[in-house]
Amino acid sequence: MPAGGSDTAGKVDTATPFCQSPNVADILATICEHKRTEIAAARRAVPEGELEQQIASAPTVRDFVDALRVKHPLGLIAEVKKASPSAGLIRADFDPVAIAQTYAAHGAACLSVLTDERYFQGSLESLRRIRAAVDVPVLRKDFILDRYQVLEARAAGADCVLLIAECLDDAELADLHACATGLGMAALIEIYDPGNLDRVLALDPPLVGVNNRNLKTMTTDLGHCIELRARIPQQVLMVGESGIHSRGDALRLQQAGIHAILVGETLMRSPDIGAKVDELLGVK
């Protein structure tokens, strides 16, 4: 699918892979430090009370978890992503709405939309436009550190938010999970470090993601989520994230008992996005 158009207002069209910087010891910590300055600026520009008023007229929440279960044995969360810290610019020919519509038309159960501006060249405005243009649930994928961002997500129409366990202590994780569910949204709680699994499962979440990408080194290992499969209860819908490139990769995870996959860069680099979705889903 030729994406056509662009979504580049206020953003540059090139990006240096963040992990190539010799001064970066911990990519995740650096991103989160910057994110807190963004949150403070956003809160000054739009107070929480104004966001809560916007939520009252936001689109009705769609059931993210159920949309994945309907696609059993393997649902696809297809990601709209222009750039990343590990790869730099991924797709120059970038029309987020056209890409999202292609994903939905080819059978994606849900969509993930990057809203981080500095490192992924995303925006909440893209999420709003996508949510209005498709009929599948939409995840706000960002570094969520504060209740304010959850309110932003719901006001923009998001049906789910990503919570990264490595970014949050126990109290923060519990509070943000409660905030999301209190607004009717789902929360995809993501881990990389197996040491975080018990504290995540203590929240009794219906949805857990395991990232195969080490966020400190940006290397991937598809076997990482397979190894953790046995530690996650069957009633918890498990999502494998990162390192998924082919139908063979998708089948490997499916056969290991993983319920869903989140795929971004593989789809965004494909000359024909729809055909690549069909390949991953085994559509002839």
Image (cartoon, rainbow, N blue to C red):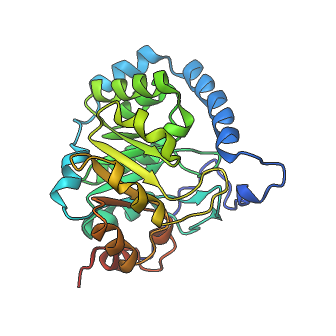
Most distant residue in the left direction: 70
Q: Is residue 158 visible?
A: no
Is the residue 117 above or below the residue 267 in the image? above
Residue at (51, 21) in percent of width and height? 46
Q: Quadrant of residue 252?
A: bottom left
Residue at (30, 59) in percent of width and height? 260
Closest to the observer, 182 or 220? 220
Most distant residue in the bottom direction: 284
Most distant residue in the right direction: 22
Q: Quadrant of residue 56?
A: top left
Q: Is residue 71 visible?
A: yes
Residue 135 is situated, as x and y percent measured from the top left of the image, at: 23, 53
Residue 105 is situated, as x and y percent measured from the top left of the image, at: 25, 67
Residue at (20, 64) in percent of width and height? 73
Q: Is residue 93 left or right of residue 283?
A: right
Residue 147 is situated, as x and y percent measured from the top left of the image, at: 46, 23
Q: Quadrant of the N terminus?
A: bottom left
